[in-house]
Amino acid sequence: LFIVWNVFDAFLLSAPQEEEAVAQMVAYGPSETHAFAVSQQAEDLQLSSARVLSLGDGRYDFYAEVTNPNDRWWAEVDYVFTSGDVTGEGTSFVLPSDRAPLVVFSVSSSIPLSSATIQLKQVTWHRLDTHMIPVYEVWKQDRFRLAITDISFDPSFELSGKKIGRMTFTLTNKGPYGFYEVPLYLLLSRGGNVVGVNRTEVSTLDVGETKQMTVNWFG
């Protein structure tokens, strides 16, 4: 189970100064941040190889991971997967010293797909404000304390007479702040390789709240 925290979609339900701190993370425009990144020799993002995940019926998910080696910068990315004549595009971001999934769901193809490549079309860098967030890791750990427990996956769950995959897990907010619109990416792996990817979203998660999560896999 791979969890991604989305700082844009999951805003803190907290004091105005916290909202200001989050806003400060996105306060720098592309031209300013690009110039500063070059002057500070920000390291390039690192991409994993792309994976093609068959869903059956001529549909495929594309998956890769991006890693940000910089501890004072986060990046927005536009990316494209290519497999023969088939392409799939998406946008995402990666936080400082973190990794993030790059996914395109349910791409159709009239011919079987077995491999793909991924390319970053555009990267926009943003510098953290050290006045609002002196040490990002401390700031992050103080706020984003989501515990994932009791993970289970049933590959042959029956729904309306059809067998599907079903994942269940427990999500607990152990931090001092509540959240809304929390996106979660879920990965299935076999032998260290990703064989399935899914996404769900939690509408709200209050301080101390525990939710029992159920996610169906139809592919």
Image (spheres, grey):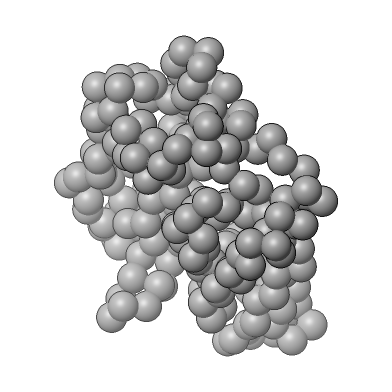
Depth check: 77 or 187 in front? 77
Looking at the image, is 42 positioned above or below residue 3?
Answer: below
Looking at the image, is 177 positioned above or below residue 5?
Answer: above
Name the residue at the top extreme: 15
Could you say where residue 144 lies in the image, as x and y percent from the top left?
36, 36
The quarter holding residue 110 reads bottom right
The quarter holding residue 169 reads top left
Q: Identify which residue is drawn at 76% across, 63% down.
A: 122
Q: Identify which residue is drawn at 37% across, 56% down.
A: 2
Q: Identify which residue is drawn at 31% across, 51% down.
A: 167
The quarter holding residue 56 reads bottom right
Looking at the image, is 32 positioned above or below residue 196?
Answer: above
Depth check: 118 or 128 in front? 128
Depth check: 21 or 63 in front? 21
Could you say where residue 118 lies in the image, as x and y percent from the top left?
65, 76
Q: Is residue 189 visible?
A: yes
Could you say where residue 165 lies in the image, as x and y percent from the top left?
35, 57
Q: Is residue 122 left or right of residue 204?
A: right
The total of numbered circles placed on residues is 0
Name the residue at the front extreme: 39
Q: Is residue 164 visible?
A: no
* Quadrant including the N terminus: bottom left
Q: Identify which residue is drawn at 30% across, 62% down.
A: 155
Name the residue at the left extreme: 150
Q: Is residue 156 left or right of residue 36?
A: left
Could you say where residue 215 lies in the image, as x and y percent from the top left?
38, 46
